Amino acid sequence: MGKSMPAAGQTTADIIRDLETYYEPENLYLRTVGLVLDAADLLDVPHEVKLILSQPKNEIMVHCPVRMDDGRWELFKGYRVQHNNVLGPYKGGMRYHKEVKLDEVKTLALLMTMKCALASIPYGGAKGALKVDPRELSEGELMRVTRRLTAALGGNIGPDYDIPAPDVGTDARVMAWMADTYINFAECSSKVTARAVVTGKPLEFGGSHGRDKATGQGLVYVLEEMLPGMGMEFAGLGFSLIGYGNVGSWTGRLLQQKGCRMHAVLDHTGAIANPDGIDAGQLAAHVAAHGGVVGYPDARAISEEEFYATEVDLFIPAALEQMVNLEHAKRMRCKVVVEAANAPTTPRAEQYLLDHGVEVLPAILCNVGGVTVSYFEWKQNRLSETWDAAVVDERLKTVMCRAARRVLETAAHLKCNLRLASFAAAIQHINQVYAMRGVFP
Ligand code: GLU
């Protein structure tokens, strides 16, 4: 193979920029911790529990050298942040994204702790990431970097310790490589249960029925529980979506099955609209073939401004964090924001929406379906069982409806908005367990 040579994105300046030694004072992590502490203050949570929740337990950073197809070497930065494990093993996705930063991973790990506690599933919270655009890699490169990352994480992951899953930019194929690498490295007493080191695997290799659609399906169950209280029903509701990846496209298809109509979609390629409705299944096929929503024949291309101003009942952000800001909120004409992505709404946007009578259904409730079916997959792996799709759906529905009711009851009890209520319900559960276990030593 040829020796290393600098190429695009590989100059000294690029390497320095990627070191990320700067600090942003107004960052999402600080704001999310602020929210957790506000919610804890609504309850009688002791200082030490607030202190513990304000920082992750472990922040792991690794650098993975990988030879690319053209012979160049590239160094990929990987993260695994383990926020809390008082309720059970660390749990959360692995994100592959070019712009990912440590503070983002810390935020997402904290949100995983909150989600699992809210849904009463026996996991703590974690999140991992690899700083890469997976669309720029060949399949072989993607596999090599995934294996190298998994090996670098080594004993920091494991079926009883920390269990990764898919997130933005990763899928069942990536999970299969992670599990296979782990199995080849780990001194496993049983290689069958070692598969439970990651969830979201392909069905043939220990995956669960319903994991692919789980986040979208869970969101639909939350709406089923919550819409009547808001005087609404599925039939005839119009919705718009930001993001048409796994979560967005499943949400679109499942809502369409419920009789709702998709009016507009925005993704990284642009925005489209059709007042008569965009077929969610056909759009999913278009995105799979072309990489984005732009160019879909049965809709009109619109600007981002027009997208936000499109009148809908449900506005569903299903892409990255903090995409809905105050300027967007001022344009939006919707009744309910349903947060499918993690932390998609900025605090100022949320306040504006609430002040203007728009309900905001919080992400830690709406998108907890993904990790819930991950839990079912992990359980099936450990029991060497395969549950039917209908069984998975029914059990997911039970968890989602229970979590939704907990949020509504907590909001009524504490007289607070649904976001604070969702955090308070989660923290209450964690706090109870700390009260029983105590803080080591
Ligand atoms: N990445 C998903 C999330 O943010 C799923 C995590 C999991 O299944 O562990 O909730």
Image (cartoon, rainbow, N blue to C red):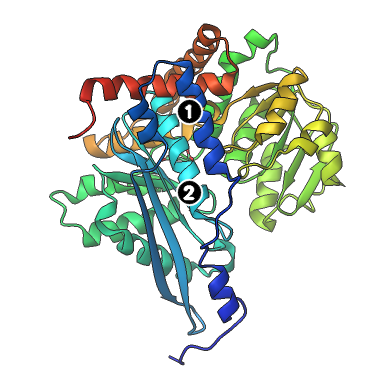
The kind of secondary structure element at disc 2 is helix
Question: Mark 1 to mark 2: distance in Å?
Answer: 19 Å
Q: Position of residue 331 (x, y in %)?
A: 84, 33
Q: Quadrant of ligand 1?
A: top left
What kind of residue is marked 2?
Answer: Val
In the image, 249: left or right of 367? right
Check the image and report above or below for 120 versus 292. Answer: above
* Mark 1 vs 2, N-terminal side: 1
Q: What amino acid is at disc 1?
A: Leu
Q: Is residue 180 left or right of residue 327?
A: left
Q: Residue at x 22, y 44 (%)?
A: 193
Q: Is residue 121 visible?
A: no
Q: From this view, report whether residue 303 is shown above or below residue 150.
A: above
| Residue 179 placement: quadrant | bottom left
Q: Quadrant of the C terminus?
A: top left
All told, the count of numbered labels is 2
| Residue 184 position in % (x across, y down) | 23, 61
Question: Percent x, y for residue 236?
Answer: 75, 19
Residue 381, visible in the rendered structure: yes
Q: Which residue is mark 2?
A: 105
The residue carrying mark 1 is: 37
Compared with residue 83, is residue 334 higher up or lower down, i.e. above or below? above
- Reply above or below: 287 against 430: below
How many residues crowd mark 2 within 10 Å: few (<14), some (14–19), many (20+)? many
Label 1 element class = helix
Q: Residue furthest bottom?
A: 2
Q: Residue at x 29, y 47 (%)?
A: 197
The reply to whether dot 1 and dot 2 touch (C-beta < 8 Å) is no
